[in-house]
Image (cartoon, rainbow, N blue to C red):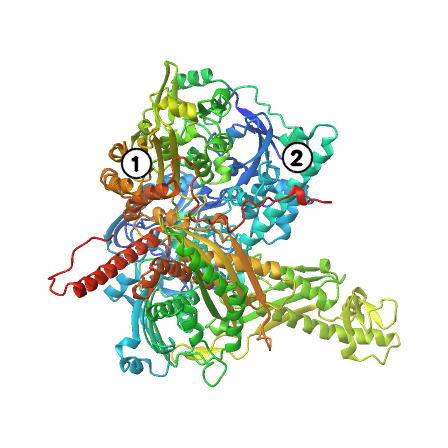
Amino acid sequence: MKEEDENASSGDSNPQITPFPLESTEAAGVRIETAEGEDPFEVGEDSTFGPVRTEGEDLVVSLLLSPHAAASIARKNGAAARDIEGVEAVLFSEDLGRKKNRLNPRRPDDAILAEDEVTYCGQPVAIIVACDDATCREARNQIEIDYHPAPGILSVEHAMAMQSFHDGERVIQRGNATEVLDSTHADQILDGTFSITGQLPGTRPPGVRVNYRPGDRGITLELRTESPGIVRSAVAAALDLPESEVTVEPHPLENNGAAREMETAFISVIAALAASRCRWSTRLRLDSTENALLMGRRHGVHATFKAAFDRESGCIRAADIRFAMNGGPAVEDSDTILDRALLHADGCYHIADFCARGILCKTSTATCSTLPGEGTAQGIWVMEEMISRIAAHLDLPAETVREANFYRDSGTNNTTHYGQTVTGAAIQRVWKQALRRSSFDERRAAIHKWNQSNASFKRGIGVIPLKMGIGDPRSDRNFGTAQIQIFPDGSIRVYPGYVETFDGLTSQIQNEVSASFGIEREDVHVSPGNPQTTPLMTNRIGVDTTGLILKAVADAGENLKEQLRTVALQMLASRGNIEIELEAIQFENGCAGVGNNPESNRTLTFSELIDGAIRRRINLTGVGFYRAPNLWWDPEVGAGWPFSSYSYGAAVVEIQIDAFTGEIDVMQLDLVHEGSPAPDQSDRDEAQIMRAFAQGQGWLLSEPFLFSDDARANMTIGEEGIPGISDAPLAIEIDRLRPNGELSVAPGAPCAEAPLVLALAAREAIRDAILSFAGKNAGKLTIDLPFPSGPPEVLKTLREVSHQLAEIAKAKRYEKESKAVPNTRGPEQKNAG
Amino acid sequence: MQSWFTFELNSANCRVEGIDTHKTLAQFLADRGTWPGGRGFSPTDPWAGGDPILMASLDGLGRPKFRAVDAGLLLLPMAAGQHLWTWDAVRLTEPEHPVVKAVQLAAAECGPRAEARLGILLLEGYYRRDLRRIGQVREQLDGVVSRTANWRAIERIARAVFAKSERNRHEAEQEARSSGMEKLIRQGRIDSSHDTLSRQLVAFFPENDEDLSYVDESKRRFYRPQTLVELLQLKKQYPDAQIIAGGTGLGLYADAVEWPALISTEDVAELRAVLIGEDQWEIGAAASLTSVGEIVGRGCAPFAKILKRFASRSVRNRATLGGYLGSASAEGQIAPLLIALDARVHLASPDGERDAPINQFYTGDGKTILRPGELIRSVTVPRFNEAVLEARGSKFRLCDAYITSRRRGLCEPFVTGGFAVEFAADKTIRKAWISYSGVSDRPVRARKAENELAGRKWNEKAIMQVLPSVIQEIKITSNDRGDEDYRRQLIITLFQKFFYQHPTIEDETPIELGAASEFAVPAQPFFDAMQAVD
């Protein structure tokens, strides 16, 4: 609280405090009398404002969400709701005031509570604070809002038609794709479109608890969030507090997929405003419908591509891909997602003249930027779809076309369209390993044979390679921090700067620190998720958290060990060992010194050493920091070195289609993934791989994306498709490969996101199976497989295929008949199907 | 009337006084915690897998069994007199239990709730005596639907723990052979696992020998009578009372709806029984779908198939046919098969009894022919042996049912088809049943097509000629998912599938067209006694 606030109670109007808008409209009404200059949201010792609660449970905060995707609001009336016993406050945007109704400092333009216009479906219109859930519900029903609904923009296609965009187009290009495409012969060109729909995150609805008592200096928040820093700065800005007074206690996240950034800041600000307004602790928990609407879903994409290729080999000479991405009602972090899509639009393929463009569409649906693989998957999948269609068009096996286009380690064939270098050999390695491990060629032949003797069920197999950039294009995010504290008895506490997601990083840190200091594992306590100790935290999604954090921890350890070595030298010298060199002092087996025999006088026990350090007043807190070096990215220019390394992988998936129902069985998965030289992490890595693959499989196959005006329907429908163990592949093989040659910048296990992209192999396999229905006419078909490819979509595609086959058969018959009887006027119209 | 009841939670007596009848066990556990030092409990959406806990009960032959039940769908008064265990308690009190060790060591699930769900389902499977083959793993664990499941690790540990359980049983049987007690081991009356839970299970004996009449603080009542007569009397006395069976259907609405009085059928012996007669099975309205599947499924393969895909294991352990029919769900998966099996539903009231074929039971729009004061007593399903068929004038019968849905477990189906054909001695079709659910507001039959099939031979031509009538007759009502086209397709293709899987009249086993099963070697047993040389 700033000093000037002492004047508040005396009635002086103080420019630092936001005055309460007494001239607010009838909508807000006047419920609480305030003297001019008093801020009803003020937090601080001298606040005597408002009813004083002395006991009781947390107040419950609830939201009234807009049922319309777009509407103008004519009237808001909360009078009836406020009269209900137990309701502490009903707040509209007018009660918050313009400044507080924003997520400063990141989103200064977009309203938290709808002001006179609703910009997205589910936008909160009112905040209700009451003593329990039932009262909140009752109050919600009593609030009267007059909406004048307008048609909202619910899809990317609609946005494109309405020319509703954010900002301008972003371009990353190399060479001159347009020129080459224009000058190529039409029979060597393929163009098309591909739509990728969004996916519901399907995680537990988030909640936040704000701990505040009247007279408290600051405010504490407990919630699950990936970025406590962002929550902290948003709440500090909303309540006009310095960030140092805002304490965030992040709870562990269930897994990487539950990471949320701006969304948690959003609900935190709401709960904090409610807490400061009502002078009591509050808790806000979204239910599943609210979660689906507010937390957003993946960024849907509508891509248009055009490619020029060589007919013999399928080698692509030039390509132009345009992404129209759902950017939600406000840009937020969606521009980074678009950047990631453009940065990955090259897949694993070298294309000499390549142009990737993207634009963000302004729509009325919320999008989420922190899901695993967000942006990356969209970019890669469009390229892979393009290659599949080229292969189908040329009647070549898709694998051959892919191999023809891989990055190679010669000349300029190993540079991406934004200028970073790729290791072509790594791509070859994972690719070959996947093909060999899965006995691809034999299985393909076996499947072909099986298909020939089965009319109503068909199997298919597909293989996809992957190159995934590790690192956030926003270079300022590629860092790790850690703090190590040594206690007087020699035990150690580590505070790494990340939020726990149960992916095993914590135990890996424990292992490394105990090995580094030579002490027992039990003496090392790792305590992640402490923003008070490490105010800057590393994100879980999009960067190589493991690598960055481990390096930061190692840095902290080294800083401490340097000091401790000096102490050890002094202590050993005082025992008469003056010939010991500083560098020779090792930490192992609970000892520090030369050799690790505790009996000898050339070593000290660790606790002795610490004791000595304390006597000598040596600092036992080590701070570590690591920044991934040489990273930069300029979105204006479309060039840079945004990734600290690449993660390579490949997957082979075999599926079976039931032509009666369109249902798909995933039969076998063979996945190869490169990374993580840490030796004993195989369990954790396998878990991460499976989870990422499952999420990808759901996105591609079973999770439908429908958007109707009924929010609850959307949510249930989306969640119903999440694959369970009964949908898992019947056989799973996973290979982890250690990175070849020089260890890329950071060791770590970036396999929480890459396998999601590899799930595309299932879609390839479906296409393969559908083609097998056509037999030898496969090359003449155009298969438009919708996304996602659930049972209805597969059956629809099969119907179209059978129509196309019927047309082909008819055409053949006509040809045959017109050759046999040259004078016939027209073909016999026989209905073949 | 009493305002309290007790139950055993984690081997400790738990007394509940005055608590709301609508409160679920999950909410209760969330309020008080599951075990000292246990992780906090917060209820999960049942469609996302729910919160299973372990309950001890007796099966039809009086043998004690553990059942995983969803705490979020169990109203608290239903727990009265039951013995329940939560994962936290097992995890903390028996860290050496094979299931506990397996779940903790393998990175199979993330987060305490998902881990608890997996753990309880594995525990139930560990103590099941009929889990023999690898292909049954998915059926046991089909409630594991989460973004955080590590499929590979889960299959691995499931196979390992189920194999261990089989091995223990095998070894105990060997030992008991000398004293002639191996049969008791197989029946589970003697402990073969030698851990606390199994000892408790073997010693389990239900204490529900009295009616329960419970009233909560808001004067809402919950009755659990022990005989059918009492149940009917209660219903007559309180005509507004809601009859509740397993609670898996109504439990979803416990937050939203007010029931001043609830009458549970759970303890009524006449309604729980599944009677195996020579000509028919009589399935009590309060028998759990799991027991129904075990008993009836043994003799009727389509029944087992359909029940295995009903919701998930923990739901099946509580759901009943009475509750299923009473809820009159338009998308119900079991109704088409019951129609195809020519089943009849028997209704009882103080004024007497009556029965009706299943498809006449539904009157549309969520309503049934139940009169006030009437309840569902049982469902009879004919056993189509030679004698029964002959009495009906037929020589052969083919029957099957198909469910299509977006995912295999815990999913509302798109369309379910139930089909049956009876043949006279001259191999012509005597009668046919073509029924679907998920197409309109109630399960329907394609009567016209059924009549057209009569007298014809069973071949492709007949099917093709009859399909247009099916399309004409079955009107698909739209829902908000926009998949009418797909469902219209399905009503044709499912019937075609039925034909292609059953082309031979004499052979009622379906042809495995897809043979996905062959891939994962489901027939392979967890534990092969022949190979156990040690």
Q: What residue type is disc 2 on?
A: Ser
| Position of residue A487 in the picture relative to residue B242 (left or right) | right
Q: Which sits in the foreground, B340 or A763?
A: B340
Q: Residues within 10 Å of mark 2 (few under 14, many from 20)?
A: some
Q: Nearer the viewer, residue A550 or B331?
A: B331
* Residue A30, numbered label: none
**Subunit that carries the residue with mark 2:** B
Badge 1 is on which residue?
B457
Between discs 1 and 2, the one toward the N terminus: 2
Number of numbered discs visible in the structure rendering: 2
Regarding mark 2 in the picture, which secondary structure is present there? helix
Can you say whether A494 is above or below A725 in the image? below
Q: Is residue B395 above or below residue A21?
A: above
x, y (%) of residue A154?
Answer: 29, 57
Badge 1 local density, few (<14 within 10 Å), some, or many (20+)? Answer: some
Q: Look at mark 2 in the image and give the residue it sits on.
A: B198
Residue A93 position in % (x across, y down): 34, 55
Who is closer to the viewer here, B499 or A413?
A: B499
**Left/right of residue A773 with respect to residue B88 in the rendered view:** left
- Residue drawn at point x = 85 percent, y = 73 percent: A602
Q: Where residue A596 appears, x then y in whole percent?
A: 82, 69
- Residue at the far top in the pictured view: B351
Mark in front: 1 vs 2: 1
Q: Is residue A135 above or below residue A368?
A: above
Q: Is residue B325 left or right of residue A805?
A: right
